[in-house]
Amino acid sequence: MSNYEEEQALEIEALTSIFEEGKEFVKISDTDFKLKLLPHPQGEAENHVGFTLHVTYTAEYPETAPEWEIEDVKGLPDDKLKKLKGLVTENIESSLGMAMIYTVAEACQDFLKENNTKELSMHEEMLLRTTGDAGGKAEGDEDDDEEYDEDDDDYGANEPEEEWKGLAEKPMCSEADRITPDVFAVWKAKFEEEMIAAGIFKKDEVKAKTGREIFLDMAPKDGADGKAAGGDEKKDGAMVYDAALFGEMEEDVDFDDLDDLEED
């Protein structure tokens, strides 16, 4: 066994005593293994990030750098993953000539602890961004209020109040965007169909009559006997007021006066 092979074997033995074999340390061969790294491997806190460091010794390791690859990345965006790879490269280059994998793994775990944040969904990112914008705006409003308070009496004193010109001069939308009676009728028919389909409206629902419709229903029809509810019909077909229908006869007529007329 060469000195390189001996150093490699000793390092693997040390790694198996530090990292739990089968869970954190997976040996593939005498020169090939994987380290599953988490910010809190003992579960003392929630792990939002993590990755696997796949290491392969070269024939002259540790005098030369080992081959390595980052796999099974969890919770690290591209920019942080790029920083992580730079960290691994830096630690390997600074440790050439001695066993270095534990040093690299320790630096990676520190990096994971610093970046152990939950990966947000697109919806959560939008809410966070909206909240941040609202907070910034609120701070800006407070600054503006402070500026106004300094000269509160004079603020806006020289600015003329805009005169209200009424709706006559209000700009209207273009004719192409205006709603015509035909367009409204089409929309109304479609709306009622949707309401009926949803069970909100009833298809045969009886609508309340207007006062005009009630009056017209009271008018005599052609071929009637000359009377209609609420009025008497003259020969020319005009409607006349029937006070008895509204209960006014008993209140307004003095029957004693009628008796006097009969005696005369």
Image (tube, helix red, strand yellow):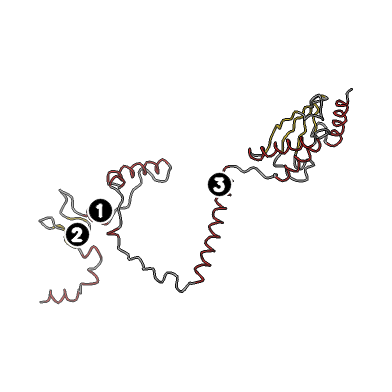
Q: Judge depth for marks 1 and 2 and give the one in front.
A: 1
Q: Is residue 246 left or right of residue 192?
A: left
- Mark 3 lies on residue: 126
Mark 3 vs mark 2, CA separation in Å: 71 Å
Q: Are marks 1 and 2 in contact (CB under 8 Å)?
A: no
Mark 1 vs mark 2, CA separation in Å: 16 Å
Circle nearer the N terminus (1, 2): 1
Circle nearer the N terminus (1, 3): 3
Mark 1 vs mark 3, CA separation in Å: 56 Å
Figure quadrant of the N terminus? top right
- Mark 1 lies on residue: 213
Q: Judge depth for marks 3 and 2 and give the one in front.
A: 3
- Residue 245 or 107: which is nearer the viewer? 107
Question: Whole-percent x and y of residue 37?
Answer: 76, 37
Does residue 223 sit above or below 162 in this rendering? Answer: above
Q: Secondary structure at mark 3?
A: helix
Q: Please state which amino acid type lies under the numbered disc 2.
A: Gly
- Hey, which quadrant is residue 244 in on the image? bottom left
- Residue 224 or 108: which is nearer the viewer? 108
